[in-house]
Image (tube, grey):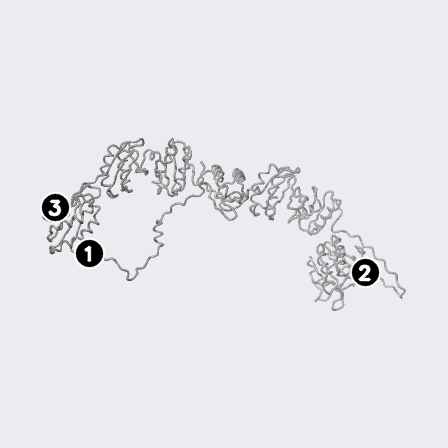
Amino acid sequence: MSSKHRHGLPRKRPGRSKREAIDAEMPTLEPVEGEPTLEPVDDGPVSITCEGGEVDADTEAALVIDVPEMEKKAVQGAVEGPLGRAVEQYGSRLRFRDVVVRFTGDALIGSAMKDVVKEAVAPAKPTKITVKRGFGDEVVHESEMPKLGVQESSEANGTQVAIDASGFEAGDLPRFLGPVLTDLAGKASGAKFTFKFSGGAKPDSELRQRIGDELQEAGAVRVAVGARVLFDRELTDRCLVEESGDVVIVTIDPAADPAITGEAMETVMPDHALGLAGRTVRVHWRSEPGSGEGDHFVRLVSQFAPEHIEFVRDGEPEVVWPGVLEVVAGKREVTLRVRPHGRSHTRVLELLPQECADLENEIQGKNVVVDWPKLFVVDDDTEGCLIDTFGKLGAERVSCTVAGEDREPFLPPPVVCTDADGRCHVTIDTDAGKPAEVVRAIERAVPRFADRISGKPARIVIAGDGVPSRTLHRAALDRVAAAGPSRLEFEDHGPVDILLPPMLEIGRDGGSGVKLGVDLAGRDADQRGRAIEREFGDGALPADAEVTLAGEIADDVREQLLAALIERGVLSVTGADGTQLYPEVLPEPEPEPLPEPEPEPEAEEVAELPAPEAAGPAEVVAEPAAAAAAVAPSAPVAAGEAGVRVLGRNDDGIPPTVLLGIDNGTDAAHLAAIEQQLVASLPKFARRGVMVVLQQGGVDVPVRKTDAMVDLLGRVLPQTAAATMLFRGPDAQGRPHFQVIHSSLRALPVGANFRDPRS
């Protein structure tokens, strides 16, 4: 059975009534000074009491008038007022009864008082007025006792009792209807009665209750007053209510006609409304309910705010109300809160599509959030139910939360697996939600694709305009890689990266030795660069590694690897054939030819540079062994108008050093040419101390201040050099020297000055 009730009615909370709450909020009015007040009526010395005249008994009523001693002519005036007020007060007890007016006291009551009594009491419609003033009983008024007009007729649906109450008031009916009920009770067993009142007077609720109680006790099956059914055993016996703790048990015997069953429920259940609030209503059907009977019961009883309504089927109670959905409409999305109310997981999934069908207008074209209760398992069946249900209803997007947390997108599917181009494509839609939400979808969806991915090439494709986070990337890679693809590619709005198989095979001997193999797997230069950057991560190489390349490696690949290894500070790199690739063993430079001696007394002889001496203590911090060794001349390493030349080197020093002569200049073209030559030679400067002399036309140019050329040297050379020293010219004592402007060596601190080894 489906239920269209999406919202539970609020339970009736204990505490003060609504009227009491309203009264408590009403302001208290202060008394207004000077406002007139009513004075109590003073009946003077005459007092009047009424005795007898009960409503439902045919007894006489007596007005006892006590008149104290006074002049005879004053009695009438003293009695008239109090008597009129007494008749008004006790009129219902005097109506249609024999009334005795008895005078007491010491006053002498004259015969004129009979007319006073008659005139005052007769409007109350007594059947007889008798005056007792000490002279015997004096009857001053008589009338016939009225009777109800009662007519009985038998019809197909029972006995019709027509009551003509003309001349009667509602207060008269209990007294005059008593004999009628007594007569009907004698023939009530198994009978049905319908009362119809005419003539103006109608029975009130108290009299209707009396009619029903007396005839039901007498064995009547059904009693109605007009259209109001007081009881109907044929109906009430079909709907029996029994309270048992927090559970109200309702047993229903459906009739052949569903209308009769509905009438039985509507007759019985409202009488138990207060007992249903906040409790579980459990319904036992003696036979399967007919069309609409279950819904009829739910609509009727849900108005009384029960906790649950359960139908017992096959001995097991099943919650049928409230429904599983509570709707919370928002500006941007609709939230459907799933509340099982004791239902099983399977039953919730059965009811979800039925209740959502009633919400098509609220769902179509909207973002929908389905909030599952805590500990509810969102499994494959749940996901399938969501996609099928909301796909048919045209929801824009569907996400799920559990107890309001851990939001995860489900529709459109944020993770899709397709086969194309001989590989498995795992496409991830970053527009499906926030990165953390998409990560949850990845962790749920990818393991289901494991059989399709295992042993096959796979590609992760990032789609959508949303910016993926590093966590999202990591989650996608980890989950897909765990599925065991033979090859794994990654595409994120750009070039495709190859993640598996790894490009580098790094074997370590437990010390500083590393054997490095390469599996290109079809990678191009950009893909190789990304693979090197990724696979030479933290801890991939030991400190001061000595690397030996394994297998045949193409020249361009070897150069990429060599630059990466040098950048990571390895001690040495050896090729597979044993050739040392780093540090590079430079050939001895050929000496430059000496100029022809001029015809002078004696040509100067070129001598080896002497070992440098220490500079002044205030300027020289240390003197490295490199500076102490002779610097041999060398040929330039690049040709062109703007040049970088090797003026000398010392391979035996610690660190090994090289002396460069660089043409000075600061225009953009010159700087670009110098940078190009320096970058090309960076591998040769690796782990060396580089001493730079700026020259202009072959003449040394001391550097006194920082300019564009100095910035260039400080930016390029530190990429591979261990230290960079710049020629500053003569110091205050006239000694030419170099100053350290960059260093990674403790022995060559930045700012230290060293004597020019050429001097």
Residue of label 3: 138
Q: Which residue is mark 1?
A: 42
Provide the secondary structure element on which disc 1 rests.
loop
- Based on the displayed image, in which of its 4 quarters is residue 342 positioned? top left
Question: Mark 3 to mark 2: distance in Å?
Answer: 171 Å
**Lower sequence index among marks 2 and 1:** 1
Locate residue 43, reporting x and y percent: 18, 55
Look at discs 3 and 1 and give the one toward the viewer: 3
User: How many residues crowd around disc 1 within 10 Å: few (fewer than 14), some, or many (20 or more)?
Assistant: few
Of the image marks 3 and 1, the number of the one nearer the N terminus: 1
Question: In front: mark 2 or mark 1?
Answer: 1
Residue 71 x %, y %: 11, 56
Instruction: Give the vertical position of 286 relative to 608 (above or below).
Output: above
| Element under disc 3 | strand
Q: Which quadrant, please, contains the N terminus? A: top left
| Residue 741, position as x, y percentages in the image | 71, 61
Q: Which quarter of the rendering shows the C terminus?
A: bottom right
Which one is nearer the viewer's eye here, 172 or 535? 172
In the image: residue 378, left or right of residue 685: left
Q: Where does the image place residue 451, in percent across and percent down from the top left?
A: 60, 36
Residue 252 as seen in the image, left or right of residue 153: right
Which circle marks residue 608 in the picture?
Answer: 2
Q: Amino acid at mark 3?
A: Glu
What is the C-alpha distance between the residues marked 3 and 1? 29 Å
Towards the viewer: 629 or 257: 257
Crowd around label 2: few <14 · some 14–19 · many ≥20 (10 Å) = few
Specify the amino acid type for callout 1: Asp
The number of numbered badges drawn on the structure is: 3
Please state if 9 lies on the left or on the right of 507 as rendered. left
Of tags 3 and 2, the one toward the viewer is: 3
Above or below 13: residue 180: above
Instruction: Give residue 518's mark.
Output: none
